[in-house]
Image: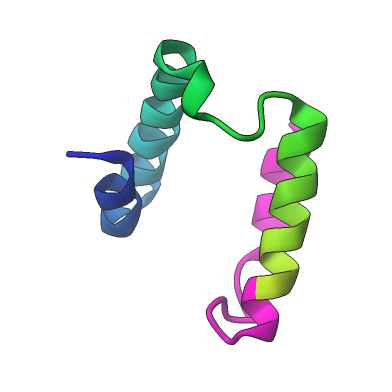
Amino acid sequence: MDLFEKCNKVDSKDELIQFIKALRHDLKDNPDEWENLSLDAFLEAMESWIEDTIDMGYLQDQAEWKSLANCLWQ
């Protein structure tokens, strides 16, 4: 199963954990295929993606934003 398929199947905390593990392994195994190799680049891309997807109606504005913020803080 590729990362896109894994992402679309995340429906629980455990599946999210497995998806994050898969992302980490893919980054280690295939760094040339990743656009954002630094934390700064990743956070900038994440910020832009969230802004764009809310504006497009793809991401709900009622998501668990505080939980995501706490996760990033850790």
Where's residue 56, x and y in %? Answer: 61, 84
State whether residue 11 appears in this view: no
Instruction: Tell me the residue at 67%/41% (across/down).
Output: 71
Q: Decide if residue 8 is on the left or right side of residue 72.
A: left
State whether residue 14 appears in this view: yes
Where's residue 22, x and y in %? Answer: 36, 28
Q: Is residue 72 magenta?
A: yes
Q: Which residue is farthest left?
A: 1
Quadrant placement of the C terminus: top right
Q: Which residue is farthest top?
A: 29
Extent of the magenta region: 53-74
Instruction: Tell me the residue at 48%/28% (across/down).
Output: 33
Looking at the image, residue 49 lies above or below residue 56: above
Instruction: Tell me the residue at 62%/74% (across/down).
Output: 53
Instruction: Tell me the residue at 66%/54% (across/down).
Output: 67
Q: Is residue 6 magenta?
A: no
Where's residue 7, x and y in %? Answer: 35, 51
Q: Decide if residue 4 is on the left or right side of residue 34.
A: left
